[in-house]
Image (cartoon, rainbow, N blue to C red):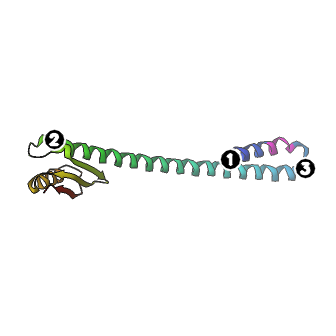
Amino acid sequence: MKTLFTVLLAIATMIALPACSKQEQEEAREQAQSTIEKATEATKDAAGDAADYARDVAERAGDYLSDSAITTRIKAALFKADQVSAGDINVETINGHVVLSGVVATDAEADLAEQLAEGIEGVKSVENDIEVRD
């Protein structure tokens, strides 16, 4: 909005030039040109900032989608494994770091769930918070 105002001011200055002396006209033209150049630079800066913001948002969205995909792959692997009560295990993924929680019947089941999670592409670490029923 400020850039638009600046450009309009420069145009208005150029329109008013005929009522001024030649020196005043030249100074006004130079000032108008300077104002237009500043407005152009400000517009380029704003466009660059917008592009940076868009890249950042896209990157964060990609991270979220990757985490979601990792969680889905782990859940699928747990459901495929007959030795694991997949419905009793919660999976949360944040930036590739996985946290397993829930309650299972045996230590072996908890360990297998952890091994399955570690085998999924994109997993950086696994925290096994699965509890074993006594």
Seen at 12% across and 46% down, the residue is 84
Label 3: few (<14), some (14–19) or many (≥20) C-alpha neighbours in 10 Å: few
Mark 2 or mark 1, whichever is nearer to me: 2
What stretch of residues is rendered in magenta?
12-17
Q: Residue at x 13, y 40 (%)?
A: 80
Q: Of discs 1 and 3, which sits in the foreground?
A: 1
CB atoms at circles 2 and 3 under 8 Å apart?
no
Q: Secondary structure at mark 3?
A: loop
Q: Quadrant of the C terminus?
A: bottom left
Report how far apart the C-alphas of labels 2 and 3 lie in the structure: 85 Å
Dot 1: element: helix
Give the side of residue 57 with respect to residue 124, left or right.
right
Residue marked by disc 3? 21
- Image check: 95 left or right of 114? right
Question: Picture coordinates of residue 102 (x, y %)?
Answer: 22, 51
Q: Which mark is residue 56?
A: none
Determine which residue is flagged by label 2. Answer: 79
Amino acid carrying label 3: it is Ser
Q: Is residue 68 left or right of residue 108?
A: right
User: Which of the labelled discs sits on residue 3, or is there none?
Assistant: 1
